[in-house]
Image (cartoon, rainbow, N blue to C red):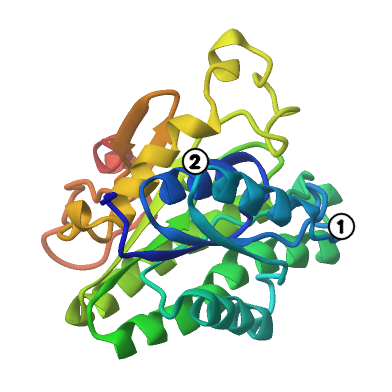
Amino acid sequence: MGLLSDKVVIVTGAGGGIGRAHALALAEAGAAVLVNDLGGARDGSGAGSAMADAVVKEIEAAGGRAAPNYESVATVDGGERIVAAAVEAFGRVDCVVNNAGILRDKTLAKLDEGQWDDVIDVHLKGTYAVTRPAFLRMREQGDGGSIINTSSTSGLEGNFGQTNYGAAKAGIAGFTRCLALEGQKYGIRVNAIAPAALTRMTEDLPGAQTERFQEMTPEHIAPLIVYLASDLARDVTKRIFFVGGGRISEMRMVRAEGVKKGNGLWTPQEIANQIDVILE
């Protein structure tokens, strides 16, 4: 009996890179996996079934259970069909790994509305579109569940030329924290990862060809996903983890002590006088 032998897991964007590693590791741990992938290019263009089919064949060749799905996560209808496909194939949904993503990197001055909307639709709306029907299904089943979202250091720390991507990923972090509170009543855990690995999404980013980054494989990330999907993490929720190259750490938003004014309103000059303390 594997750690996840009684679980059904949906992995979006599972046709390559980090998503493929997630799917293979989850299946190896015993989960039945719905392998979702639109089959498009890194920028989201195009579509096809080959990528999802190839991962399903890998899982089945290793003795695991999997089914392919080719829906886009970027629409509510697509998200509902993804969850319905998992239920049709395996009878239930215990975990969702929201991994699907695209890149349309531009500095803000060069970023047009379409490039903004496409990234927000796949990452942020896609997380909503798949999670909502899965959450409702888990609530109906009545025995908890796990939702694992994919944020990014680009959203939580910032990265040049990724205002669209960073905004989506920061939004996913907020979505995670809020939904974790809503899920507690039903035993539904909601966490997120901020992964770092060499994939087709990152291969041409600055520093990607360094020896250190070359050693940061998608396989380094998958064990955390298996853990968060399992009952070993039954008490872990509302957390965001950095994971990459063998390192796992919690990413936290903290509020510094700051300075409180005794009486009256702050003046701009008083703020200037105290800014070093405020920023400590």
Residue 168 occupies quadrant: bottom right
**Disc 2: which residue:** 153
Q: Is residue 72 left or right of residue 40?
A: left
Q: Is residue 270 visible?
A: no
**Where is residue 210 shown, x and y percent of the image?**
63, 11
Can you name the residue that lies furthest to the bottom here? 140
**Amino acid type, mark 2:** Thr
Query: Image height check: is 19 above or below 217?
Result: below
**Amino acid type, mark 1:** Ser
Question: How far separated are the C-alphas under marks 2 and 1?
Answer: 25 Å
- In the structure shown, which secondary structural element does the residue marked by tag 1 occupy? loop
Q: Is residue 277 left or right of residue 172?
A: left
Between residue 32 and residue 80, name the one nearer to us.
32
Q: Residue at x 67, y 79 (%)?
A: 78
**Where is residue 67 shown, x and y percent of the image?**
60, 64
Q: Residue at x 54, y 55 (%)?
A: 169
Query: Image height check: is 224 above or below 76?
Result: above
**Where is residue 208 shown, x and y percent of the image?**
66, 21
Can you name the residue that lies furthest to the left here? 262
- In the structure shown, which secondary structural element does the residue marked by tag 2 occupy? helix
**Disc 1: which residue:** 45
Indicate the quadrant containing the C terminus: top left, top right, bottom left or bottom right: top left
Question: Marks 2 and 1: which is nearer the front?
Answer: 1
Q: Residue at x 84, y 65 (%)?
A: 114
Query: Image height check: is 247 above or below 97?
Result: above
